[in-house]
Image (tube, rainbow, N blue to C red):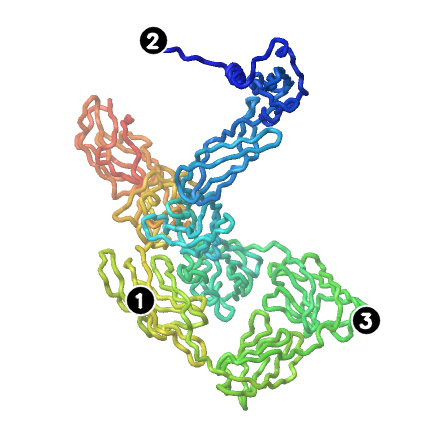
Amino acid sequence: MAKKKQFVTAAAAFAVAASAVAPAITADAASTTVQLSSDYVRGGDLDAALDKEYKGSEIYWYKSSVDMNKLGVFQTAKGFVKGQGIRVEKKLRVLNHAQDIQPEEIVLEEGVPASGLRIQPVLFADGVKYNKVVTYAGFSTEKAGEFEGTFTYSNKAFGVVTKTVKYKVVKSEVEISNVSSSVDQAAEVLSVTADVKNLKDGEKVELVVYPGKDMSATPIKADATVKDGKLTVSKKLPAGTHSFQLVSGEVKSSVENFTIEAPMVKDVKLNNAKELVITFNKEIKKDSVITSDALIAGIISLNSSDAAASSSKAYLSNDGKSLTLVATTTWNGSYAFEVAKDKVEAVVSGQKVEEYKAFVSAEDVVRPTFSGVTYEANGAAKFTFSEPLDETAATIASKLVVTGPTSVSITASDISVAADGKSFTVTLPAAMTKDVAYTFAFTGLKDFAGNLSMPNPVTATVVNSVRDTVKPTVTNVVALDAGKLQVTFSEKIRPNTAVVTVGAAASSTYTLDSTGTVATFSPVTNLTAGVQSVTISGALDLAGLELDSVTRVIQVVADNAAPVYVNHSVETVGSDRFLVVNYNEEITANAGVSVTGTYVDSNNITQSVTAITGADITTGSDKKSVRVKLPATAGAYTLSLPANLARDTSAQTNGSAARSVTFTLGAAVDSTKPVVSTFAQTGNKVTVTFDRVVTAATALNVANYSIDGISSPFESAIFKGDAQTVELTLKNDVITTDGVRNYTVSNVATSAGAVMAPKTGTYNFKENVRPTVLGAKVLSSTEIEVTLSEALDSTKVGTDFDVFQGASTTALTDSEAISGTNKVIITLADPLTTLNGLTLKAASSIDLTDVNGNQVNFVGPITVTN
């Protein structure tokens, strides 16, 4: 029989142990109990609160006499003194203390320093978890996996607790959020910003653009800059509707759409009776619209003629986006305004502006306002207005009254009217006392529409002061090349005044920079390589003060440095792609050389490139690049750029060195917008043709076609013969009168995603109200007259009606002919025997129409009367 296990309480065990080393306590001795001074148990450390000895002898304590989870109340700890037979007791109160650290699951990211671990939940004896500051060790994020680390909580009042815990390290992913984009339409640049997290050294984020929103096409990419978690990236792109996303490895942002507008006219409006302003959405090239301050013929027409436009003066705004036409006489009335297709060229992309048509009403009822008086460098007073004035120097002088301390007379010879008519200057006479105020009053100044100035009269305080008494000086002279000299002056000088002389030859052809102080002379006769003496003379400042002639000795070094290749890229313009080769200085492209090379096609076969030469090699608009028109075939290209492809503008016309370039050409994406070629109506059908293939989803959407004054005029659309021709069916009876109406076609796109610019035109529409049968009556035993609601096409009258009698289902035999304009006479083969039960129905072959081709709206039956 097995022995039973014996369970001994802690107190009993302690007593047994004590009896083994100490003699039994006598009854009298055992009855002696010593009360020791009371204490607190701090940090859960009971031993620290118990006395170790009594009068030199060791004390044994029954620790089970104290419940460590019983907080805040006094308990009695009991024990005895070894060998003394003395009981001891001590009053103790256990304070709250830490028992365990109990963190939640810990997951860290690989490569991201461990953080956020200093605060952990610590379980106290009162059963409550408190968030406490701990120390930690052994937490590493060098690699992914499951590991162990330790937490330690240490506090003088609440004790020390150490806990070993498991934690996971997981691979971290880049996070891309708060993606935002904007498009600078003038510069044709997409800019994207975003917040980026967890981007490690060596990782990058790319902007990936899908041309035409086609994610199967070769994308356009650009590396983004990420600093302090903020991403920025910009990319110049071709016109069209595209999409983009940010990509880092396998992490991708959502795909977002955006549009780069093609160059177009945004608005045409009358500024005043003299100025018509055409606003473009992008900067345009001046030499594509203006020559010698006049509009180039064939670009803009008014009322189908370019005479009025081309005879006008024209100027371009500083930003290149507003073209102002100044009328020879005035703008007055309504004009059919048109900008011809593919004439005006944009600066940034080189693309041509598409066709634009609009009606412009010109009526100037706005009064010109006085902007103020300023002073020219020569001291003349300049009066400026908001628009051109219909005034000459003589009329201005006749309308001027000057009052002041002395009598002053201003004549027409003292007045100069600006070319644009918006200002005039008055040379102030010597009779005006210096630095004393005079009042100039002009009464009755008017614009070209006859509107009087605001205010009227115009009054201004004018002071005759010495404005400029300092002559211009030369601050620097440097030879840019043989025959090319740059002179810097101390102040702005006037054009066509300065002269440089080398030897006995004088040269006066120069251009001024934007500051008006730096003049570049070219060509300069006798300015050859070596040491040369150069005399500069004749330059006038804006006040008319003349430079004192100065001679400088300079070293002339011929420019023998060839233009240096910087980089190359591929640009798309419409359906064409161009290799753009950039150089470090201004150059001209050499169309007389040939660019050759090879490409690897989709079958991994190396093919030769047909030599590119002539008109396919051009100078870029920045004058520092060569544009080479590329083949349409996709592939990995290697092109040989021949020597002298680019030549600089020096006297030596140094040519670029030969070099090889490589690039990948994706499938061509034609970003050219479709345009309407023709618009015509025949009866109930309207046919619209486009200049290129368009998509069914957009071209066959009747909501993309409208006619002024008619809500939803079309009921259906189909392609007719090809995907460039759309046949629209008008809803019955929607056009009630003949006449010219505006129509609009919009939102039609190509398969590449190029959306047309809205096309608004005029067309002389024919009404499509269907004729109806008003009635039928018997004229004789063999004739029945049918009357319709409008004039009929006589060529369509034939077997259009059936006459029935009684219950018969067989039509009477007849023939039909037109009578007048809107009647049909039915002649019966056999005379009627009775007038009872005659009815009229439409024949199955009815094709009778009105004169506009609208088919008769009739089924029947109706009763034939007599």
Q: Residue at x 25, y 38 (%)?
A: 847
- Callout count: 3
Q: What residue type is labelled 1?
A: Leu
Badge 1 vs badge 3, beta-carbon distance below 8 Å: no
Label 1 and label 2: CA atoms lie apart by 103 Å
Q: Name the residue under label 2.
A: 1
Q: Where is residue 527 in the image (x, y as percent from the top left)?
A: 51, 85
Q: Mark 1 points at which residue?
A: 639
Q: Which residue is drawn at 49% across and 83% down?
A: 557
Q: Position of residue 149 (x, y in %)?
A: 46, 37
Can I make out residue 17 in this image?
yes
Of marks 1 and 3, the one in the foreground = 1
Establish if 139 lies above or below 372: above
Q: Mark 3 points at which residue?
A: 406
Q: What residue type is labelled 2?
A: Met
- How many other residues sit within 10 Å of disc 2, few (<14), some (14-19) or many (≥20)? few
- How many other residues sit within 10 Å of disc 3, few (<14), some (14-19) or many (≥20)? few
Label 2 and label 3: CA atoms lie apart by 147 Å
Q: Is mark 2 on a helix, strand or loop?
A: loop
